[in-house]
Image (cartoon, rainbow, N blue to C red):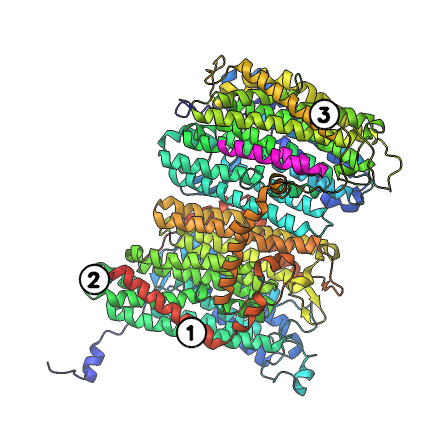
Amino acid sequence: MHASAYEVLASAASGTLSSFWLLIVIPAASGGILLLLGRRADRWGHLLGCASVGVAFVLGLVYFFQLGGLPATDRRATLDLFTFIQVAALKVDFGLLFDPLSAVFVLLITGVGFLIHVYAVGYMADDPKRRTFFAYFNIFVAAMLLLVLGNNYVMLYIGWEGVGLASYLLISFWYTRPSAATAGKKAFIMNRVGDAGLAIAIFVMFANLHTVSYDGVFANVDRFTSGTTLALGLLLLIGACGKSGQFPLQAWLPDAMEGPTPVSALIHAATMVTAGVYLIARSNPIFDANPTAQAVVAAVGAVTLLIGCIIGCAKDDIKRVLAWSTVSQIGYMFLGVGLGGGAYALAIIHLLAHGFFKAGLFLGAGSVMHAMNDQVDIRRFGGLWKYMKITWITFGVGWLAIIGIPPLSGFFSKEPIIAEAFDRPGWAGWVLGFAALLGAGLTAFYMTRLFVLTFHGPERWTDDIKHPHESPPVMTVPLMLLAIGSAAAGALMATPVQDWLNPTVFGVEGGEVPEHVHLSHTVVTILSIAITVLGGLLGWWLFRNGTSLQEQPAGPVVTAARKNLYGDTVNETVFEKPGTYLTRALVYFDNKGIDGLVNGLAAAVGGGSGRLRRAQTGFVRSYALSMLGGALLVAVAFLVVRLG
Amino acid sequence: MNGFTIATPAQVLAIDVRLPDLDYAAMAPMLVLFGAACLGVLVDAFAPRQSRHTIQFALSFIALTVALLAVIREARVGSRELTADVALAIDGPTLFLQGTLAVLGIVALLLVGERALEKGGPFVSQAAIPVGSEADRRQAREEGATEVFPLTLFALSGMMLFVAANDLLTMFVALEVFSLPLYLLCALARRRRLVSQEAALKYFLLGAFASAFFIFGMALLYGFAGTVSFGGIHDAALLATTSPLLLFTGLAMVAVGLLFKIAAVPFHVWTPDVYQGAPTSVTAFMAACTKVAAFGGLLRVLYVAFDRARWDIEPVIGTIAILTMLVGAILAVTQTDIKRLLAYSSIANAGYLLVGALAFSKEGLSSAMFYLAAYGFTVIAAFAVITLVRDDDGEATHLSRWAGLGREAPLVAGVFTFLMLAFAGIPLTSGFTSKFAVFGAALGVGEAWPVALVIVGVVTSMILAFPYLRVVVMMWLSEPAEQSPTVAIPGAFTSAALMVGVLATLLLGVFPSPVLDLADRAAEFIR
């Protein structure tokens, strides 16, 4: 109903709103200044970095209220800065769009981003390259803002590439471990698979409609055949999966956690990984037009949220547990956007709540690592509550929020998604609903395990730690603010955000009461609270006395979970091996190629090529022969095409 | 049948022998360059040794500037005409590509004329002296050959003729005029002379082989159409009274000759060896200008002479385009020498250009021309950076030697990073806009082949991003090698070339519209 009803609203930005391009320019300019000035900016660089994001947040608030002051139907502002590309039929404007959906993302990115920036001032205090770090941070924020503020898919793609590139360099920048190359490569390749999906989707839109602007595409969705909407939906989903670490492209995200903790918090909790959810929510008319594509999105979400939970139960590295919980929570968001209708807004609410509590959890983990000489193994923590009261309490709030204990934010954001899942008609409702419910129980279990092993039970520290200390205020204040957000955001946001997003962005009228197909809302609420408490109690019971320091022999399920459910093995078989063989085959047929191996990357792709070198002669006669063969083939091909 | 008759003198006189009309203004760019090149030969013969380099450089620079002005003048007049008895077509594409060649030629000339990086310049004094002989050791201290300037000008005049040629015979002459100087230029490296000479010999032998295919194809097409002019072949294909066997075999052979020059698979084999062996400034010149000229010629042949055979061309050349993209992208991944890596990237880029060319539309033509201009600037700048990274043996081109360059020389590494991102097609560089333009043009046609080509194009450009970013990561994140190469301080010429290349890459990425407009307005062949 909504797809064909999409109306293009004339809405050039006016008044204060006409300057909302500043949101992107301020952090970008700050990042550029920090890079250009070099060491001269070392002493105050971090302050400029924080200030620019802070200013962007304040501006974002001003624009947000401006937008809110408009009547509901007029709540969008566009800016066409200049024509970017114009080739005959194709015209792409460098255009921006500020509407309720982008406004929400702007506030999340700049708000949570600002707190993480402040925290990083303390966390990176001893690092000689702190200024460069803040420059990359700012550029990353600017790219993410461009991603959510563009008014067409090409702008989105520019921001998308920018975010990917910035994060790739930011993660790799801090690598000192040998696993660096592999992890960086994995992140890169999986993101490229996703990017290819998005790029092809954009070209499909252009080929069909000769436009790539949101307005132009969404207004004409009914001109697509159902095959085209399905293809578009799946291609966009591949793009979203790549960026958001969803099945089957989930394996890179936890590996990329090896960077410094503020990077993990900013990139992999609050902003970058949410780009996939944004992409699908923004493209809602396309998904609404094709129930099959929606069902696939929901299924991907359900599978991923279970994968994330199961692996999260088996990990002992504090940041990896949090990373897999990110994968799992974004699975809930995908489930939400896949359910469509009113669930779009629920997914966005969960995204906002998750932004708060996951940033808080990551920064709390950073605070713990700070106290424990960068130890990340939760088997070597324990009893920390006595020594770091603020971290303990704020982490505790985040823990209760993520597992969904009322009245913290996770409860208000996650439970409605579970209820929506049960409302899907047919067996799909049962499957999706129980997957979501089971996920809630597992989340409660592994997050409780993480919390109890870190802060309670006997002290199992390594010998070099004598007196753990609480972090400085520059780190604890952001923690406290994020904890307040994690606690209160859910209850405060749930209804207003739905009213804010539904009518304008998702075309859902207020007051629609969903039909309860399988279970009533009350039953779902009771069930989900019960299973959460059960999972939490089980986690506390099993780990209240700590755990052994060695890895225990385990059954097949735990072993599989420890090995990331064989995700890496699958990737290796599906992506890497064929690539390697293809390359080897091509090198074999090409006459000359390899001079030797540079590094591990080349070794992975070009391995075994040393043996082939003897076959690559570089002789002119063999070159001439291949040309002659080619010429014959071309001639024969022409004749076959023509006469055959 | 009364056999053949011999014309009597009276009959010979009766044949109306008239000179073709020549529009000198339209031919001025080519004539200026050709004249300056001949003058350059005289300068080399008579000018005193120590002032030759200065005179030659000034002469070449002025000649190219005048040629550029002549192109601009002709474009402002709005010429659209066949001249020299339909042997030359002066139309939009000719002028756009000649202008591109002149500008890229000036930028490449700056690299060729650079002498600050190495005593005596990057060229050997006398290439004929055997390598390793006593005379060779003596000439190591001598100044480099100044013949490179007239050779470059001869090559550029041939390229300009090539993009204007409107019949196969003129095109063949132009092909040889620009190829022969290139063979010589490849052999003139001061360092690693054997590799350089081997590259030149390979290029020459294979180039001659490819030329033979071209001539054979020309003969077959003459047999088919009774003429070698593109318009005549076009008309004959419409009537098609003779066997299409001649037409399509001829087309195939001519195509082989042209595909060799643009380095399409399977006629790409020479590219990595030649790019690696030739002096880097010459490689830059070839990578930018030869690509422009060869594609200009190919576009004219396809669009003017064979547009009626479009449905037969698409599957064959389309398959070649797919192979070219795949082989270029995948083999780039395994390269360990930066010049070979750029050679494979140039092969893959030929594939992307073919995607635009096979659209057989005005947009296809304009986007391919834009791509040629954008790619030319980026590739010249990239090779300019390569001339700067040196050790005792000259340029250090093995990738392992580039590790940790970011610490050594952040500015140079930063510039190269930007260029690599442009090659990878990251938005806000010309690499993105040009790829977007050709893929968009191909999809605008809305048929199966172009769509398949675009999908392969997108996928391979994702693969190709990997080797580029690997270089970036090596420069910034790896530990420097024990004896890392030094980064030479670029002389004024190299700095200027770099600046132009980088600025053009940035501007064509952020504000591509003016040049896209220009290409769009120029995109119409006359027949």
State the mark number for residue B240: 2
Secondary element at image label 3: helix
The part of the chain drawn in magenta is A299-327
Pointer 3: what residue? A482
* Residue type pointed to by label 1: Leu
- The residue where tag 1 is placed is A625
Mark 1 belongs to chain: A
Secondary structure beneath label 1: helix
Q: Position of residue A558 (x, y in %)?
A: 63, 39
Kind of residue indicated by mark 2: Ala
**Position of A47 compared to A276: left or right?**
right
Q: Residue at x 47, y 14 (%)?
A: A512
Examine the residues drawn in magenta and state their main secondary structure: helix
**Mark 3 and mark 1: span between their CA atoms?**
69 Å
Residue A362 placement (x, y as % from top left): 71, 33
Q: Are marks 3 and 1 in contact (CB under 8 Å)?
A: no
| Left or right, B304 with reference to A130 | left
- Subunit ID for the residue under disc 2: B
Q: A246 or B277: nearer the eye?
A: A246
Mark 1 neighbour class, 10 Å CA radius: few under 14, some 14 to 19, many 20 or more: few
